[in-house]
Image (cartoon, rainbow, N blue to C red):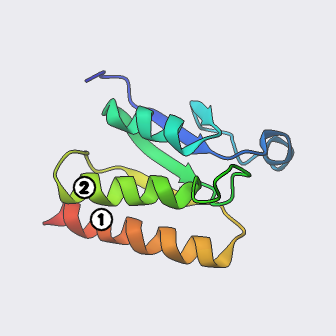
Amino acid sequence: MSSKQIKVFLDDDKEALERRKLFQGYDVWVTTPEEAIDLLKKGNVSHISLDHDLGLEPEDRNGYMVAKFIEEAAYNGELARLEWRLHTANPRGRQNMFAALTNADRFWEE
């Protein structure tokens, strides 16, 4: 496990978000759920911000995939507590990710 803690930002539209300055303060930008999960598995992510819709095929390759990974890893004691944020405009996606990450918070508290 690396000691350098990083903040990860998952989104497919870097240009739009740079204009809005949402990426400021993050160390790593990723555009796929697989990239985010690979970083989480390394054990040095202290904060993650998730978008839901990533424009990938199949459509279930989205931010919810990452939120579900975090939830399961927290449940299994395989992931240290981290801070999270959602920056998606998709209401249903936000609701699903919020539920999974809230569960992760509960598992970390147990």
Task: Give the residue pinned by disc 1.
Answer: 105
Determine contact: label 2, label 1, CB under 8 Å: yes
Amino acid identity at mark 1: Asp
Q: From the top left corner, tell me how far across and down residue 8 is, in percent.
A: 53, 39
Residue at (69% x, 52% y) in the render: 54
Residue at (16% x, 51% y) in the render: 77
**On screen, residue 98 above or below 25:** below
Quadrant in the rendering for residue 60: bottom right
Amino acid identity at mark 2: Ala
**On screen, residue 42 above or below 22:** above
Task: Give the residue pinned by disc 2.
Answer: 74
Q: Is residue 84 visible?
A: no
Q: From the top left corner, tell me how far across and down residue 93 is, in percent.
A: 60, 71
Q: CA distance from mark 2 to mark 1?
A: 8 Å
Q: Residues within 10 Å of mark 1 (few under 14, many from 20)?
A: some
Residue at (74% x, 52% y) in the render: 55
